[in-house]
Amino acid sequence: MLPTTGRAMDQLERSHGLWKKTAPPAPATTSLDGERSVDVAIVGAGFTGLSAALHLAQRGIKVAVLEAEDIGFGGSGRNVGLVNAGMWVMPNDVPKALGPVHGERLLEVLGNAPGEVFDLIERHGIECEAERQGTLHCAVGKSGLEEIQERAEQWQARRAPVRVLDAAETAARTGTAAYSGALLDLRAGTIQPLAYVRGLAGAAMAAGAEIFTRTPVKSIQPSNARWDLVMPGARLVADWVVIATNAYTHDLWPGLRSEITHLPYFNFATAPLDDRLLKQILPERQGAWDTKEILSSFRLDQAGRLIFGSVGALRGTGAGIHEAWARRGLRRLFPLLDGVRFESSWYGMIGMTDDSLPKFHRLAPNIIAFHGYNGRGIGTGTVFGRLLSDHICGAPETDLPLPPTEPVKQPFRADRERFYELGAQLAHFVSDRF
C-alpha cells in the first residue's frame, strides 16, 4: 500500500470532514505500473465504478478500476449520505422528457434504488451506519406544501410507500416547528457515504476486481479493436471502458465535462448531541431537507452528531459566510442548539445537467458512461453500476432506463458555476439580515 503523505491527509480532512474521521479504513491499494490486460477498465472509484466492478467480478469478468486519487475521493465520499429514491424532477415529468418507455423504466429503477443499496450493504456486511427509516422532504410555507403534496400523489399513483405528514407530525419527527408539512418516503434512508464506498471497494476486491489508486488516466486510444489506457508509467489494455467520474470528470473524454455544471454543497457537523436533545431532534433518525430553492439538509450520524448543509463552497469568502449562516440556521430551527460547536466541515460538487436528468452515453464502440446524477448519487450510482455490468455481459442497450445520447455542452457553464457559488454566498449572507 502506498503511504499517505501529511499533505494528502490534510486535504482529505478538509474535503471529506466527518466522513474521513469516522469511516473504516479503505482496503489497501497500490498505483498501477507496467502493462496489463483486462476485460473491462473502469475509470473512477466511486459508487458507479465500484458497483460495476463488483457485479462484473462476481460474473468472472477480469476488471480493473483506475482512480486518480483515493477511493471515494469525489462526490461519493463528500455528500450528505441521503439514500433517496427517484430524482429532483417530478415523477410525471420524467416520461414527458424521456418518453413513456424509458421514463417509467427510469422511475422504477431509481424508485427501487435505495432497496438495492441496503441489500448490498447487508449482503456484503458493509459497516456504514445504515439507517432505513425513510427521509423527510420538508415543506416551507404554502407553496412548499403544495409541492410535496403533488409529488406524493404522483409517487402514490405508482404505488410508492410515501405519504404527506401534517405540520404537527412533521414537528414531532424533526424537532422543529419550522415546516408546514413533510413528505415521508419509506423507501429511503441514510448511510455514512465514505464508509459505504470503501465497503463496495472491499467487496469488489474480494470478488476478484483490481483497484488502482493514485493512477490518473491521461488518454484512451484505440488499439487493435481494443482500448489502450495510458497513465504515468503504466498502460492498460481493455475490451470495454466504463467512464464513471460524474461530477469529478476532467478532460479525459471530449464533451463530458462541458455537459456538467458544478453545484457546490457544504456540510457542517456538530459535536455529538446529548440524549435529551436526541429525543427531540430527528428521534427516528430520518434524513431531511427542505423545499427552498437554496435548500438546507439535516441528519444525524450514528454518534448523534447533527449534520447541517446547504448550497455553497467552503473556500475564500464562502467559508466564513456559510459557517455564520449555518449557525443562524441551526439556531432558528433548533433554539436549544444555540452555541453548539461544529466539529467538522467539508464540501463537494454536485454534477447538474441541463434538464436535471442523468444521461447514458455510448462514447465510442465499447466505451460507455452514465453521467449527471443531479445530487442523487448514492442510489443512482449503485444501480447504474449494476446496469453497466449487465450491459457489458450481454443485456441489450434497449433494456437500459435511458436512451443513448451524445454529450451536449451547456452554454455559459463556467459563468453559471460562478453564479451558483457567489449567489449562494449572497443568499446566505443576507439571510435573516434584511
Image (cartoon, rainbow, N blue to C red):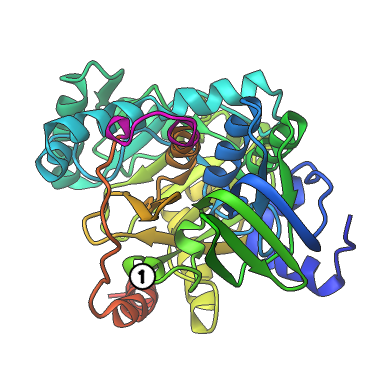
In this rendering, the answer to whether 356 lies above or below 156 is below
Residue 166 appears anywhere in the view: yes
Identify which residue is drawn at 49% across, 39% down: 385
Say which quarter of the image contains residue 275. Answer: top right
Q: Which residues lie in the magenta part?
A: 389-400
Q: Nearer the viewer, residue 188 or 66?
A: 66
Indicate the quadrant containing the C terminus: top left, top right, bottom left or bottom right.
bottom left
- Measuring from the top left, give residue 214's x and y in whole percent: 74, 64
Residue 306: quarter of image: top right
User: Does residue 343 sit above or below 208 in this rendering?
Assistant: below
Would you call the spot at circle 1 few (<14 residues within 10 Å), some (14-19), or many (20 or more)?
some
Residue 262 position (above or below residue 365): below
Mark yes or no: residue 341 visible. no
Could you tell whether 137 is left or right of 96 in the image?
right
Residue highlighted by disc 1: 255
What percent of the width, then of the height, locates residue 409? Answer: 27, 71
Q: Residue furthest left?
A: 96
Along the viewing direction, whichever of 147 and 9 lies nearer the viewer? 9
Name the quadrant of the N terminus: bottom right
Q: Position of residue 294 (x, y in %)?
A: 31, 61
> In the image, what residue type sits under mark 1?
Gly
Q: Position of residue 120 (x, y in %)?
A: 59, 25
358 up-or-down from 190: above or below: below
**Which one is in front, 405 or 417?**
405
At 75% across and 54% down in the image, what residue appears?
A: 36
Q: Is residue 91 left or right of residue 247?
A: left
**Residue 391 falls within the magenta-colored stretch:** yes
Q: Is residue 289 magenta?
A: no
At numbered mark 1, what does the secondary structure look like: helix, strand or loop?
A: loop
